Amino acid sequence: MNKAIFLDRDGTINTDKQYLYKISDFELSPGVVEGLKLLQSKGFILIIITNQSGIGRGYYSEEDFLNLNAWMVDYLMQKGIRISKVYYCPHHPNAIIGRYRKKCNCRKPALGMYEKAVREYGINLAESYTIGDKIRDCAICEKTNCRGYLISTNEKKSIINDVIDGKYTRIKYKNNLLEAALDIQ
């Protein structure tokens, strides 16, 4: 069984720029390279789990997303970081593009993308973590024995305070991905 780090993309790996799809707009968040290298050195496989409703909303195409994604994975590989796979959900209940308009089981906080990764990579959730800038990125922690980290200040202050106060028993708060990586054993 493998142990994994499930990573959100926007606001976790890169600066959240609202519906990012252009390579020229991509900017790694501070400490990400060091944090991902550290997690790899601890034996974790790295998997990105990302909602991409901008596809369904018509802000950018699936091809635009896949081009940025391929570039990002290659860019990180050049830095010595191997992303095993990127799972993405293009759906949204109010999508303007019909084929993406649905309530699915993959859009976080639903667990469909996580479940697929667990099956495809033989992941032991008890030894795995999820890291994201929104509480929905940590939804798997409330339904399984996976643990998680809420990072940054992109979430509502009240939710951040609830995490800090221990109201979410399997989720910790850290300022960024590197701080989370340093805390993970």
Image: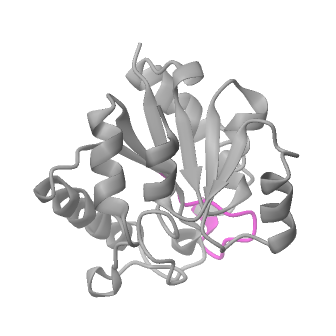
Span colored in magenta = 88-99
Q: Residue 49 location, x and y as percent?
A: 50, 49
Q: Residue 109 location, x and y as percent?
A: 72, 49
Q: Is residue 178 left or right of residue 141?
A: left
Q: Residue 172 location, x and y as percent?
A: 68, 47
Is residue 175 one of those drawn in magenta?
A: no
Is residue 98 one of those drawn in magenta?
A: yes
Q: Is residue 111 above or below residue 144?
A: below
Q: Is residue 8 above or below residue 53?
A: above
Compare residues 26 and 103 and report the one nearer the observer.
26
Q: Is residue 59 above or below residue 89?
A: below
- Residue lying at 33% horizontally and 50% vertically, measured from the top left: 36
Q: Residue 52 location, x and y as percent?
A: 53, 65
- Residue lying at 58% horizontally and 56% vertically, measured from the top left: 132
Compare residues 180 and 105 and report the one nearer the observer.
180
Q: Is residue 106 left or right of residue 2?
A: right
